[in-house]
């Protein structure tokens, strides 16, 4: 372990916290950018960044976990590990992985090829299975063997049919099948599951092996087996990634937790885990915050809580904790304005909710809040979203609706979305007035050209395509496609733009040869979707910030993000908490599901910096026109009753 030496401006705030370099070891230099970032951090955050061993950073919303994680990654790359080794940083979503990679490179760190910032599944597939399966007894995934969503459901249905429960529909049971397979991989008891579904899940695993295929669950279980059973693989992993960073640890399921433990306990990799048990909202897919607590309670991990909320005003924090039903006693930063929380009671149905939500968004814009800093959040698709879409369009408001999972999955699809974001932003900056341009350039968060070039190179390598003629070929072609002078403003039809991208970057070649099935079908799926749904270029820029647009998205997708103003319409019983569809029948949520929905509501509340608007009333009309007079959400009423 080496210590940072100072370059540039003098620095006095934390030398005593800096580990001293053992005699004879080289001293790495800390850049000015990193030094000033370290100075800006709270002492507890700095301690987490500089701690030489394992760290668990458990902290509430807005407490600077992501900022600390980014600083830690930059610090490790700059000062602690040689240029030939790297840091693996795993997150739960592609958007989060992109965001961390972007922020690390923004710090001026030369991270190219040294930071592997991906989702947990991509890490298992690319860094463990593809890299090492050939050295072990596990089958190495080949081209076209990674099952997409549809293929997974078809195979599961086949297994249901084979074990005699043909009436069970796979499309409603993939979550349960995953839970069974995870419990099985962790040697947990299976008594709580339907034995016929357990048999089907076992058959499913056998079928995957027999067909030489792999799906998302199997990526993790097979990666875990490889790490546990193969010492040379562990040595190689440690040589490449002496440090592993895991974001949103509360969203990990048991198998992933076991994998982290194996990488630490058996391979000797140092772990930095970040999370918040109160923001655990993926229990339905097997995630459990208990794994974060378990990691924090280990003696070889430093458990560092962060107390200050840098995002929200105190008023918003107090309301959010009242909604959660747990007093965490978190405090806003000194000098932060308290923030406003407004209850908007409407008498009519969801049309009125949508009207009020749009009025509030327009008011915020009049008060000089930038549109991209305003979010209208809804719990899930359904009547709330439908009425919002109608009202926003009727008024001709500029908004970006993140269409959840409608765009195809896979890394190629993700790459296209990032290119779309870059094209949209470039166009906006180009089209802005000379006065607005500098501020837009500062605010723009779209991926940079070189990051896109890196992603494209990676896709080509994975597809085993020859390298381009010259180093600059890809860059130049990308530049032409995303040129700010192009005729493709964000309201242009996505289909034409996609066709241009496909041709110029020869994406079809990648799609054909790429080992992931999702990638091999994503281009055609994409083109089909663009045409049938009449998507615009801006619709492809999902998960990315689009300047000048109010964001319309779900509570789940808003996780990890922050906005000046957050508007929550549809806070009505039946919508939030919502009833659950179980095997085609509707029922009330059980206590566990209710708690998870409450946490999702808490996540939504905690996205706001300055203003939070809660819209509720006596009831709403269902799709069939039936009036449900179920009253305001119990979550809102409970919150109100707990407030002083
Ligand atoms: N030491 C600090 N001083 C001032 N601002 C900070 C500090 N640390 C973080 N922030 C700011 O606080 C905001 C929230 O930080 P960040 O996104 O890292 O929090 P988080 O803990 O990851 O939040 P969440 O769990 O809600 O996603 C950001 O705008 C960040 O820049």
Image: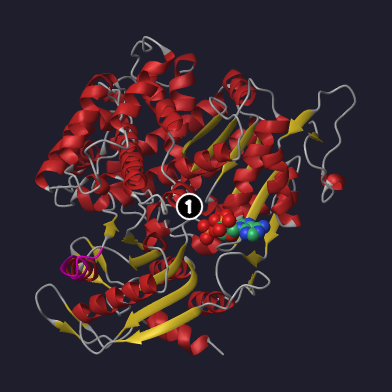
Give the residue at the far front of this rendering: 434
Q: Secondary structure at mark 1?
A: helix
Marks counted in the figure total: 1
Is residue 594 visible to the viewer in this orientation of the structure? yes
Q: Residue at x 60, y 29 (%)?
A: 110
The residue at which mark 1 appears reads as 251
* Residue 394 counted in the magenta span: yes
Q: Quadrant of the C terminus?
A: bottom right
* Residue 35 counted in the magenta span: no
Is residue 140 visible to the viewer in this orientation of the structure? no
Foreground of the two, 65 or 637: 65
Q: Give the residues drawn in magenta, as a range.
A: 391-397
Q: Is residue 559 above or below residue 385?
A: above
**Residue 473: % across, % down:** 37, 16
Q: Quarter of the picture for ligand 1?
A: bottom right
Relative to residue 313, is residue 443 drawn left or right? left
Q: Quadrant of the N terminus?
A: top right
Q: Quadrant of residue 369?
A: bottom left
**Residue 545: % across, % down:** 38, 51
Foreground of the two, 543 or 464: 543
Q: Residue at x 56, y 52 (%)?
A: 291
Q: Is residue 630 above or below residue 269?
A: below
């Amino acid at each position: 372990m080496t210590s940072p030496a100072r370059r540039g401006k003098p620095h006095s705030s934390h030398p005593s916290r800096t580990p001293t370099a053992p005699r004879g070891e080289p001293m790495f230099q800390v850049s000015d950018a990193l030094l000033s970032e370290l100075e800006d951090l709270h002492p507890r955050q700095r301690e987490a960044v500089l701690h030489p061993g394992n760290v668990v950073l458990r902290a509430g919303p807005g407490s600077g976990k992501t900022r600390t994680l980014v600083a830690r990654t930059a610090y490790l790359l700059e000062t602690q590990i040689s240029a030939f080794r790297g840091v693996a940083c795993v997150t739960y979503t592609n958007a989060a992985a992109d965001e961390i990679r972007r922020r690390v490179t923004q710090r001026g760190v030369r991270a190219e090829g040294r930071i592997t910032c991906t989702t947990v599944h991509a890490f298992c597939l690319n860094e463990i299975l593809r890299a090492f399966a050939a050295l072990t007894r596990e089958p190495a995934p080949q081209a076209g063997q990674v099952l997409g969503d549809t293929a997974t459901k078809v195979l599961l249905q086949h297994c249901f049919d084979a074990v005699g429960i043909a009436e069970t529909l796979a499309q409603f049971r993939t979550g349960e099948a995953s839970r069974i397979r995870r419990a099985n991989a962790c040697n947990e008891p299976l008594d709580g599951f339907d034995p016929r579904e357990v048999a089907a899940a076992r058959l499913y695993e056998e079928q995957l092996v027999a067909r030489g295929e792999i799906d998302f669950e199997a990526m993790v279980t097979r990666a875990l087996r490889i790490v546990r059973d193969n010492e040379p693989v562990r040595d190689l992993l440690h040589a490449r990634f002496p440090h592993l960073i895991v974001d949103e640890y509360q969203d990990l399921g048991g198998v992933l937790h076991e994998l982290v433990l194996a990488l630490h306990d058996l391979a000797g990799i140092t772990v930095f885990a970040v999370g918040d048990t109160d923001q655990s909202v993926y229990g339905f897919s097997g995630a459990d915050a208990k794994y974060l607590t378990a990691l924090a309670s280990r003696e070889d991990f430093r458990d560092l809580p962060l107390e200050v909320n840098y995002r929200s005003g105190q008023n918003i924090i107090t309301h959010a904790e009242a909604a959660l039903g747990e007093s965490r006693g978190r405090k806003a930063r000194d000098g932060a304005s308290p923030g406003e929380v407004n209850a908007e009671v409407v008498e009519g149905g969801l049309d009125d909710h949508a009207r009020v939500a749009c009025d509030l968004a327009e008011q915020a814009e009049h008060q000089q809040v930038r549109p991209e800093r305003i979010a209208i959040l809804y719990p899930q698709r359904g009547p709330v979203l439908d009425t919002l879409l109608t009202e926003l369009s009727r008024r001709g408001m500029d908004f970006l609706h993140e269409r959840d999972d409608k765009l195809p999955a896979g890394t190629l699809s993700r790459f296209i979305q990032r290119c779309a974001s870059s094209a949209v932003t470039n166009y906006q900056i180009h089209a802005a007035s000379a006065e607005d341009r500098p501020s837009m350039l500062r605010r723009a968060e779209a991926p940079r050209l070189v990051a896109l070039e890196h992603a494209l190179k990676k896709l080509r390598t994975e597809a085993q395509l020859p390298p381009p003629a010259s180093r600059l070929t890809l860059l130049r072609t990308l530049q032409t496609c995303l040129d700010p002078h192009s005729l493709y403003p964000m309201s242009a039809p996505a289909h034409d733009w996609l066709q241009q991208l496909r041709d110029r970057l020869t994406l079809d070649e990648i799609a054909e040869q790429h080992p992931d099935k999702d990638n091999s079908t994503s281009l055609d799926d994409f083109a089909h979707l663009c045409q049938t749904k009449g998507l615009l270029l801006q619709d492809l820029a999902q998960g990315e910030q689009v300047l000048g647009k109010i964001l319309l998205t779900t509570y789940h997708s808003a996780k990890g993000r922050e906005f000046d103003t957050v508007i929550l319409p549809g806070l009505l019983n039946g919508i939030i908490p919502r009833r659950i569809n179980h095997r085609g029948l509707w029922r009330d949520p059980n206590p566990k599901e209710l708690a998870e929905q409450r946490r999702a509501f808490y996540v939504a509340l905690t996205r706001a910096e300055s203003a939070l608007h809660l819209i509720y009333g006596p009831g709403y009309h269902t799709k069939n026109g039936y009036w449900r007079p179920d009253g305001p959400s119990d979550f809102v009423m409970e919150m109100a009753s707990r407030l002083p």
